[in-house]
Image (spheres, helix red, strand yellow):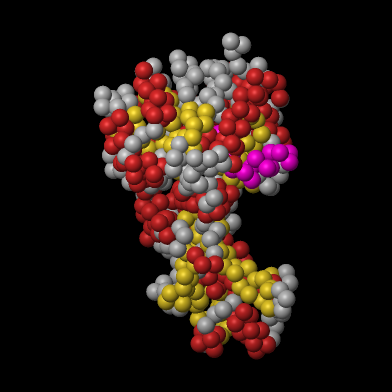
Amino acid sequence: MKAILYAVPGHQGWEWKYSLDIRADMRYWLEQWGERAHIRLLEPSLSFGQAARLMELLNCSRVRHNDEISLLKKMKELAHEAEIPAPWIEQMTLRDVPCKLIGPQLAPSEFVVMVQSLEGRSLLLEEFAQLTEYVKLGSVAADPLYYIQYAFLHGYLRVSSGFKTVQKRNWPLFMKRTEHTCRRCGSGGDNLFTTDCIFCGCPCSYCESCMQMGRVRFCSPMISSIATVNGQGAVQPNGLDGFITPWGLSDVQAEASKEALHFLLNAYAKNSPEPQRFLIWAVTGAGKTEMIFPMIAFVLSRGGKVLVTTPRKDVVLELQPRLKRAFPHTKVVTLYGGSEERWERGQLTIATTHQLMRFAEAFDLVIIDEIDAFPYHNNPMLEFAASKAVKPGGAYLFLSATPPEPLQKAVRRHQLPCARVPARFHRHPLPVPKIIYTEPLNRLILKNNIPQAIKQIIQISMDRGAQLFVFVPKINMVEPFIGMLRSGFPGITVEGTSSKDENRADKVVQFRQTQTRILVTTTILERGVTIPKSDVLILGADAPLFDSAALVQMSGRAGRSKDDPAGTVYFAVREKTSSVMGAIRQIRDMNKLALRKGFLHKS
């Protein structure tokens, strides 16, 4: 997209501005100064990204504007620095233009609704058009740039180039180099590609990392709201119990929730521009969802907005009915790819982490569930999106059974406040994995034979009426082990599934309904599937693909029910690895902590 660059008189000379629709600027300056209003216009129009960069350089240079010839010369020097093509620079001219009322009449009611609808959002122009269509703003849809520019001038919106541009100097020669990063996802470098652009008429970079959400170009306007701070009344620390009692939490859960509430109280009291962070480190099956209810209620009671985000769509769909039941008088919006509520606004939002790219400074509290899960874990793009979504002075609440190592290190160094939840609601210890030694899995597949030790483990599970998760490290191992298990246990229903299985959802339902006794699978089912009476066998637990976090999560499928809290977990390995021993150590440490805190049954 192209934009116009112009200057208006300021306290220290002229101040440069960019415009998506100069008619809105003329209207605005006429309202400010009356008939004497005039602007100094730069021609020709530029790519919006170039206009934004040149404006920044001009305003930083503080060039005096009395001598038009020397000003134009200086402008052309700065235009080279802004990487504007030479033919455009040669055509640059300046002229004084009196402001005239040449735009359409604004529809005041639509203008107000537009600004309200953009609250907390960060959108491309195409997405803005979809929003105005959804909200039925006919006048805005007819002249979108006019309304956007007018709101921008009044300080209701931010309008930024799709890319953030910074200049750095290379060591040791200290030569200047320009770096671009995508404002929506934070990607740069090799993730940016340059092509001829039909929108601005010159070579223009675009971001490939977040293309699935719409293409961000150097010349794309990013339209976002200005964060507002809600009035927040004081809450006494002893009044926090009122946010915990209604939810019927166990003492284990209540202790963690109270620590998190104290954190929020202190975080909001600080009113720091930097968002504060807190981690709830809870064992698998501890009831993390129920533990966040007090924090949600606390923020909502203060007029704030809450986001609960998770990497996986299936978890979002699972959370939706639970949160709606818990907060029946709160507007709950659910967002994922294909969601029908994409443009709805609510006090409580549930979303996949990818959807956060469309938000900016929107939420007082951002709760990130399964922070260690794919695709959020080790994904700078999604971490960047999450960092944009929280308001200044807001807070993050991380939930995880297996926090990534950087978070664990921050906890150890007292840089990240943390509440540990070392016991499940039924107050029984976590099943500690037992190690058995086997040949490499590839050799077992070649032999087409299950070792006797593994057969005995499986038979014990079958004899006690349990269902069995059998985890393997690779997708291509699922089918061979299905065949071996069916041969070895002809009277038992054995199925298998993986991320490539189109019928995975149906097979999980059959497993939940006990139609299947043994399910061979990969880490795709390491979390999110709870079976009341289940055991776990991890074949090739020493495989490089299984880190400690994955092993802990897979182990966590066992012993989740109060009727069967002592399910068994076996690690079948060729040799002990740091991941295997680290997982066992983490589970034992949580059991020791639970025992020390009195969270386990004395029996």
| Residue that appears at 48% across and 44% down | 543
Q: Using the image, determine if residue 18 lies above or below residue 469.
A: below
Q: Using the image, determine if residue 117 lies above or below residue 526.
A: below
Depth order, front residue of 260/515:
515
Depth order, front residue of 450/518:
450
Q: Using the image, determine if residue 413 lies above or below residue 144.
A: above
Depth order, front residue of 565/435:
435
Image quadrant in which you'd find residue 60? bottom right
Residue 87, how many percent across, how many down? 50, 87
Highlighted magenta segment, given as a residue range: 397-414
| Residue that appears at 47% across and 70% down | 193
Q: Is residue 412 left or right of residue 503?
A: right
- Magenta stretch: includes residue 360: no
Q: Do we see residue 552 in this rendering?
A: yes
The quadrant in which the C terminus is found is top right
Q: Is residue 362 left or right of residue 460?
A: right
Residue 507, how many percent across, how many down? 30, 33
- Magenta stretch: includes residue 412: yes
